[in-house]
Image (tube, rainbow, N blue to C red):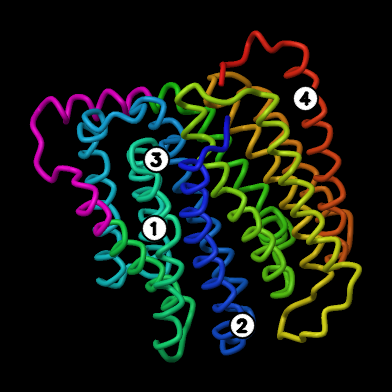
Amino acid sequence: MSLTAKVMLGYGHGMAWKIAALASKLGFVLLVLPKLADGVFAQYAYISSIALFASLFLSFGAMDAVPTYVRGKRAIRDRLAPLVHATLAGTIAAFIAYSLGGGLWALGAAAAGCSIAYFFLAGVLRSTEPHLFELISNVPSVAFLVLALVVPGLTIDLLLVLFVATNMVVLVAVVWWSGLPWRYGRRALAFSRLILAHLLVQGNAKTLSNMLLLADFRALITAPGLLLKTLPSDAIAVAMTVGEAAWQLAMTVINRNYAAYCAGKGTLRSSTLMALSMLAAISLVGALLILVPVPIRLSRFEWPLIGWAMIAFAGFAALSELRAFLWSRGVGDGAILLVQSAAVLIQVAIVLALPSGQWIPAAAASLLVLALVCLAAAGGRGHKKPSTQAAH
């Protein structure tokens, strides 16, 4: 895929918003996290992870599968409006249930509903208006920080309420801004039901892959709670959050690439080179944090641990780029699921076998090797079989 001025401008737009979102998350860690009671952040990470697992399962891979149906055509996009509106309505219903005394898990359901609505709207807009996709992916983080700074006495309930509120406002605003119709006829309802049926049948691999991806990211946070009946330290949660932020920055490029791949651009070889570049760049930053003392001291920040987390997520970034290309060509589902399952099992084994201080370094080393093996396999295939790849 050639790097034209338009492509670079698109990368710049996505990167600018992603940097704003990551700066907001950093601001949360620096300005809000120190004010929270011990364990609140780890509990928030745990509940939000469970909510994300549920939303990935119930979205049926919509964020990645729906663009392959829309293919950049606004007429098809508009006929999927009922799916978006239904998910928004479900989120509002869950939040009302919490307001009527439904408890923390009702609030968790509302958080899951927000994510489901995001996945469907992202799938609908991803190939037609990637700039709006970038807005719904990043603006809520900025708004969340602003509210967290002004709302006093933050508890786990209030953090989840702020998450639901900021995401819902942004989602509804973008639906209005995009011109997605609020009224539609029977044909749109029938088409939405048809696509939902396709997702139920054909989106299973993508749903499972996305759930495994989240399991990859949160294994060191959720596995201790599920298997050892204990939560990891805030330092581990912070390190994994920073590492995931590096992956999210890489995803601004991967998401734009995926839109181009769905249009038939790019080759396996170019995707492999892109993945290798991401792996090298993020790993270099992580290595510097491990080897070079950082003079800045922050509560719950352990810089070498953060460096190892970045190396772990460098591996995830490389694998995500390869996954985007393979999905755009409708191939490789089995291999993708196998690699992601291996990553989860490796981290679970690490949690069970090693003390908590060694979890992230051991996971980083394992994931780095796994990513390099996959890149070598993809590079060899791309070199030997260029005829199976789409032309530039």
Q: Eyeballing the image, is 121 above or below 239?
A: above
Would you say the residues marked 4 and 2 are in contact, meaning their CB atoms lie under 8 Å apart? no
Would you say the residues marked 3 and 4 are in contact, meaning their CB atoms lie under 8 Å apart? no
Q: Is residue 390 magenta?
A: no
Residue 109 locus on image (x, y percent): 39, 58
As measured in the structure, the alpha-carbon distance from the residue carrying label 2 to the one carrying label 1 is 28 Å
Q: What residue type is labelled 3?
A: Arg
Magenta range is 172-198
As measured in the structure, the alpha-carbon distance from the residue carrying label 2 to the one carrying label 3 is 32 Å
Image side of residue 274 versus residue 392, left or right: right
Q: Residue 30 carries which label?
A: 2
Residue behind mark 1 = 109
Query: Disc 1 or disc 3, which is closer to the eye?
Result: 3
Would you say the residues marked 2 and 3 are in contact, meaning their CB atoms lie under 8 Å apart? no
Earlier-in-chain disc, 1 versus 3? 1
Instruction: Please give the name of the residue rendered at 36% of the width and 53% of the height, measured from the top-left corner.
Output: 113
Q: Which amino acid does label 4 sit on?
A: Gly
